[in-house]
Amino acid sequence: MKEAHHGEGDKKTYKYGMVIDLDRCTGCGACMVACMAENNLPFRKDNSSRVRSNLWMRVYKISNGRSFPNADVSYIPRPCQHCEGRDHHHATPCVSVCPATATDYSHETGIVSQIYTRCFGCRYCMAACPYHVRIFNWWDPVWPKGMKKYLNPDVSVRMRGVVEKCSFCFHRLQRARDKAYAEGRRELHEEEYQTACTQACPADAITFGDLNDPHHKVYELKKNRNAFRLLEKLGTNTKVYYVSTRAWVRKAADAYTGNQGDIVIPG
Amino acid sequence: MKLDRRTFLEILIGFSAGAGGGFMLTPVNWKLMDDMAIWSQELWPRYQLGGLKGRLPQRGEVTHADTVCKLCPGGCGITVRKVEDRATKIEGRHGYPVNNGGMCMLGAAGLQLLYGPWRVPGPLKRSGARGTGSFGRISWEEAMDTVVQKLTDLRVKGEAHTVAAILDSDRGTVPQLFSRFLKAYGSPNFIRTASVDDTYELVLNLMQGTSGSVGYDLERANFILSFGSGLIEGWGSPVRVIQAHSKWRSGKVRDRAKVIQLEPRLSNTAAKADNWYPIQPGTEGALALGLAHVIIKESLYEAEFIQNYTFGFEDWSDVSGQTYMGFKRLVLTEYSPEAVSRITGVSASKIAELARAFATADRPLAVWGRGKGTASGSLNECMAVHALNALVGNINQPGGVSMRPEMATQPWPEVVQDGTALAGSNMPRVDGAGTSRYPFTKYLPDRWPQVMNGGKAGAIKALLVQGADPYFTTLDSASVARAFDHIPFVVSFSSYLDETAYHADLILPNHHYLERWEDMPTPVGLHKPILGLLKPVVSPQFDTRHVGDVLMTIAKSLGGSVADAFRWEDYESVLKETMGDKWDTLKEVGYAEEPDYTPPAGFATPSGKLEFYVSAFDQAGMKIARDVEYLPHYEPVKPEGDAAAYPLILIPTELMRLADSAVGNPPFCTKTLEENELQGNDLFVEINPKTAAEYGLSEGRRAMLATPKGKAKVLVNFSEGIMPGIIGIPKGLGHAAYDDYLAGKGVSANSLMGVVEDPISGLCATWGIRAKLTRV
Amino acid sequence: MDSASLPFDHALFPEGTKRCKLKWFLLWIAALHGPLTVGAIAAVLCWALALNVTNLNNNYPFGLWIAADLGIIALGAGAFFTGFLRYIVKIDELKNIVNYAVVIGVICYASAQGMLGVDIGQPLRGWFIFWHANVHSMLTEVAFCITCYFMVLCIEYLPLILENRQINKLGFFHGMAHHLHEAMPAIAAIGVFLSFFHQGSLGGVPGVLYGRPFAFREGFLVWPWTFFLFILSAIACGPCFTILITWITEKCAQKQLVKRNVLDILAKISGRLLAVYLVLKGIDTVYWIATAKKVGAPLGSFYANQPYGYWVLVLELGILGVVPMLILLSTKWRQNENLLILACFLNCAGIFMNRWIMTVQSRAVPVLSFDKFVPYAPNWVEYASTFLFVWAGAVVISISYRYLPIFPQEKELNPL
Ligand SMILES: Nc1nc2c(c(=O)[nH]1)N[C@H]1C(S)=C(S)[C@@H](COP(=O)(O)OP(=O)(O)OC[C@H]3O[C@@H](n4cnc5c(=O)[nH]c(N)nc54)[C@H](O)[C@@H]3O)O[C@H]1N2
Ligand SMILES: Nc1nc2c(c(=O)[nH]1)N[C@H]1C(S)=C(S)[C@@H](COP(=O)(O)OP(=O)(O)OC[C@H]3O[C@@H](n4cnc5c(=O)[nH]c(N)nc54)[C@H](O)[C@@H]3O)O[C@H]1N2
Ligand code: SF4
Ligand code: SF4
Ligand code: SF4
Ligand code: SF4
Ligand code: SF4
Ligand SMILES: [Mo]
């Protein structure tokens, strides 16, 4: 797939993104597992440490910090936010810092890719990402006997010492494109390119599509007056929108509370 | 000397300088660098994936195959993406009437169960002591011969009735084959593992005279009052219920459905609800009656329905002129909001408020069945909730309660029982179900271990287990273990090395659900008939056989009337014949349904009406003293243990990310558990910080959890979402079987819980147990 | 003296200097190899078993290694800065210490690169940073400048080797050394240019992270303020490090090697630069507090998580900043050797603390309000593999001191 240079040229540019309805999200975690299964994520006998385990999609459980019986919790599924950045000085945080150009912002699709075979594991990108999206491979992947059979050939397995993250299931876009081209089409239908987490979600909480395309559902959904993005103030200009009718949830998404400790049930 | 050293130095320096510089000038070192990089990118990962043999993951032609998930009673349609002959991904099947493309975490991890190391590789025979997990491979012939031998002996000795079978369900061809087998062989002991169905079937039978469990029209209800049901955690058919929830959450915020959760803990369901009313656990029934009180007092009930279609609402008198108390009087006298408030801890004003909101909503629905619905529960509690639904007249109505229907299938020829079979089948069941003591109850899955340990050690001499893991899922693990020790011959048909298989003498592994044919009857909790078909997606990965075929082979070898009962040549022909005219649709489409099904009106009770006053009790000739016993009333279920020694209350909590039924949690799912749920191998229990402070417990620290049934080391998780005085312990961990991805993690909640019998049904009404938590 | 009583290798010693017996020397070198081997083992573990053997995690992509890296390079600034003062500003007195400054510089920069070789997840591909260079990345700039400057340092170090008594006897090498000396001002100029840049870029590494309000700084053109602050702090402490190491060397050699007036020049300059730095750092801090607040990060949120309380600010800028500055500025205190060494030590410690704060603490502070702070402490593998380079440095210094004419004033101060 060739990439148009900063959206110039004859190629149409897309802006793939998500709108996640937190009123619907149940925290069930199907999206997490669907992602693991789709993208050949490794697992270990003990994954109980969040700071070492590998989740491309992580569902945070957040609390309003009030005491019984006024306590309330909400879930925030967090894939890569595929930050567009604001301007030259505020380009995609992780991409602009990668010394080896191993991660890259596609101005044609708006997707932040990760090239595992080029990454050499300096972890500067992780330092740059405020969303803890990027994961380092602290171990080589190991699958129990027989389990390699289910690995998805569309997604390469990653070796130790490299960083990885949610790719918006980029390989699915590639497949959809191949199919479209084969059928002599240039345009994809909305449902032809959907991410694994979106498809799995039993609550239909995740909607995925081209934020630029008025015919795609996300186009209208992101305009909801309860829609917000994580850490808007930083100017990362993310492509994942959230919707919640609960004010405290919207506030938690973009405001420091001073003492993080008391409003989070870590997840 | 000096000169030597000098020349020596000259040579040394000259040489090293020359060598170093020279090497840097050659391309060799650059080439080496590049080679090493490529090695790190390509060869190393390939080596990691099993050596250089071929490209891994293997690429190839991609195909898709539809089937049905069998990892829970949800019966979701799934589509499996395959590369050549490998299944590489499970996705929800679009347009499937149950889950329309949706998935749950467990279903999505199904391939880890298919290809996982915890599969049973082939027929296994126990070689060491029970529970040591030492087994030896044997041939299928030897395996089946062993079973035939054992069963023949028992039958000859006239002990056919001491053979029991435990299954996860009594619906569908496979369970039917087992009950047919027992009937032809001569045993009454077909046991179904516990679920809300046990009690709901009973309630619908007593109050409506119908046989079958419940179906809720969740999608069309718009005021959902849940009595502690884990609608989000996995009650009923999990994906279907979650999708209904999303429906409630769609449209204009103003017009959205209201969801009320009554539960002592801020579960996911409670968190998603519009209102969460923390309630003293075990008092849900009282609350239902409190609501009924307000609804009746303010005449907010469906007078028309109550008048024409119910019996026992008003006081009434029989032919002899004797008058009986009606539901109305009972409720008005006994269950004032104030009285109920004292029992439940929910304020009187909230009760009144809630009652009005419920009764005046246009499509109210009261949902019953604690948590995921894996426990039987209290008969009276269920009756009270059902009465509440009756009051608002939503029985058999859109958005209401009806009976779960099945698609019609072809009946099988009657079993011709020989003498042994007749004699055996007429013996009383080992669990006592159906006896004069429990005339209406079909199965008492939590009772048989108590019976065996209570002096009837010989009651079961051979146990067949299929689709269930009673050793793990039955309450009071210690007594279950003792009961198993009494059983000389345990056969498991499990595909996985689960707890029961681990303690079995013989394992005859069934195909994995993605490797076999089977029918999937209407999923639990549905109000419309749906018949799904499991089709093999991949060829069997191990030396397994379809349990249907194995059972029939055994039957045939047993000969006589047993063999005669199984004329089919193999399981596939059973399936084909049973599905009859639907077979072609099923093979083509994968399912059959009746989208515009409407529940039949009318009730098959003695009065032909929905009975608040259960006259069936009289017919069964049960000795019942007081009127109130015939009516839905509040019968407190006392938790085991005395308050002095055990000041706190332990309740099981169900996490949607932790499978707690017959299927062990796959690695992917365990990976999603939060840091305050599992840490290393240690399980967290939930407790309110206030209570914790009283007992000097500190967050994240170790503590000893003790109940009358056992004790376990746990970690303490402070939560503002749980009622003071209560401890929540997640179900699903504490496995010894499977392998180190699951075994040894956490403790089993069931090992700390006991069985409290419902006085009328005999079913397990346990909702919790007294406990104490001390720092260690 | 008759050559019999002299050490076996005395012919290699610098002209007219005295050194201990060879066996003592070898014993000392052997001793250093003890901890050095432990460090080597740690490094091998990282390569063989991957980085899970460390305490680093996804919340701490940067840990002890990176902090030490930045610290060491800052301390190494003594080399280029002394060179700058000696050859460009032409403070002639400094010729008596510039050699040693170079040796220390070589060690610092070699260590920094060695540490990175352990720190990155795929060392075999480390060179991709050059091959697939991304010009927008501060790290790329750092990598290129540091590598080039390291070469420069080696070239500066080379004449010292060539001036070894025996090697120097060889006409070719003698001439080579001579010519290199001629070219030294030019080489020093290149070094200065490169150094200013990578010291700055190192400041840019955290400074550009606008996703991390704790680290982010506004700036001038493409350079965040930290770019300039890092240069300044580096040259403010580099000379102090040179003094410190010289002092330690003298204690080990049990003789004075450099005249005090030479050290005093460095100390004085250090003190003044430190003063300027602290003023600018103060302004930066105030400005930073304001800009961070704009993006929703009140100062409190930065210091809400133990162990990183407000004391961090006080210690870094006060005790490890103002105190040494005052000592270094006052001629009277400076002349007092103990106070001088204390000041140098505090100054160097301050640099390490600053680098730790900018690289480690700045990652630790959660940005998402619902994210949770997790503490981090390096484990033995990280410590051992970091100190590995201290021991290696000691070996290089020992050998250099024994065989190379590093201290022009040694003979004069210690007549045989
Ligand atoms: N759909 C799809 N197809 C692809 C690709 C893709 O990305 N997608 N990638 C393409 C690319 S980049 C490549 S390189 C090719 C790789 O495709 P192939 O070249 O087919 O690579 P492998 O299948 O890994 O190896 C080929 C055979 O080499 C054998 N072999 C291994 N070691 C040795 C040896 O030492 N000697 C000999 N004689 N044989 C050995 C292996 O057993 C295997 O049977 O696949 C291409 N095909
Ligand atoms: N296990 C295993 N490992 C192998 C091999 C093997 O056979 N088995 N084969 C080796 C060989 S021969 C090769 S060539 C390598 C190939 O290995 P990789 O280079 O990893 O090739 P892919 O896995 O096809 O693609 C890598 C990632 O790039 C993404 N990608 C695809 N197109 C683009 C794009 O246009 N831009 C960006 N930024 N990203 C894109 C893909 O989604 C994928 O996640 O694998 C090597 N490693
Ligand atoms: S699958 Fe859907 S509902 Fe479940 S956690 Fe993910 S987003 Fe939420
Ligand atoms: S979320 Fe993090 S990883 Fe994803 S694009 Fe933004 S900065 Fe990069
Ligand atoms: S870790 Fe990999 S992707 Fe991240 S910055 Fe370093 S080289 Fe780039
Ligand atoms: S988009 Fe794809 S890669 Fe990203 S989280 Fe969802 S499933 Fe995972
Ligand atoms: S809900 Fe039950 S049936 Fe549906 S996918 Fe999950 S496990 Fe399978
Ligand atoms: Mo390749």
Image: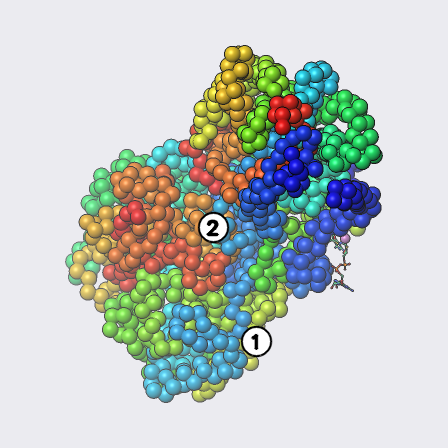
Disc 1: residue Cβ within 8 A of ligand 7's nearest atom: no
Q: Earlier in the sequence, mark 2 or mark 1?
A: 1
Residue A101 showing in the rendered view: yes
Secondary element type, mark 1: helix
Please give the name of the residue rendered at 63% of the width and 61% of the height, measured from the top-left corner: A149
Q: Where is residue B33? Give x, y as percent.
A: 75, 47
In this view, the residue in front, B307 or A248, is A248
Chain at numbered mark 1: B
Which is more foreground, mark 2 or mark 1?
2
The span from disc 2 to disc 1 (Cα, nearest Å) is 38 Å
Residue denoted by label 2 = B657
Please give the name of the residue rendered at 48% of the width and 41% of the height, measured from the top-left corner: A267
Tell me if residue B39 comes above or below residue C362 in the rendering.
below
Neighbours of disc 1 within 10 Å: few (<14), some (14-19), many (20+): few
Q: Where is residue A154? Give x, y as percent.
A: 69, 52
Q: Residues at badges 2 and 1 in contact (C-beta under 8 Å)?
A: no
Residue denoted by label 1 = B573
Q: Where is residue B484? Give x, y as percent.
A: 35, 71
Disc 2: residue Cβ within 8 A of ligand 3's nearest atom: no
In this view, the residue in front, A51 or C7, is C7
Secondary element type, mark 2: loop
Tell me if residue C53 comes above or below residue C158 in the rendering.
below
Please give the name of the residue rendered at 70% of the width and 44% of the height, measured from the top-left corner: C125
What kind of residue is marked 1?
Ser
Chain at numbered mark 2: B
What kind of residue is marked 2?
Arg
In this view, the residue in front, C13 or A105, is C13
Neighbours of disc 2 within 10 Å: few (<14), some (14-19), many (20+): many
Instruction: Name the quadrant containing residue C264.
Output: top right
Please give the name of the residue rendered at 53% of the width and 15% of the height, measured from the top-left corner: C335
Tell me if residue C295 comes above or below residue B208 in the rendering.
above
Residue B365 numbered tag: none
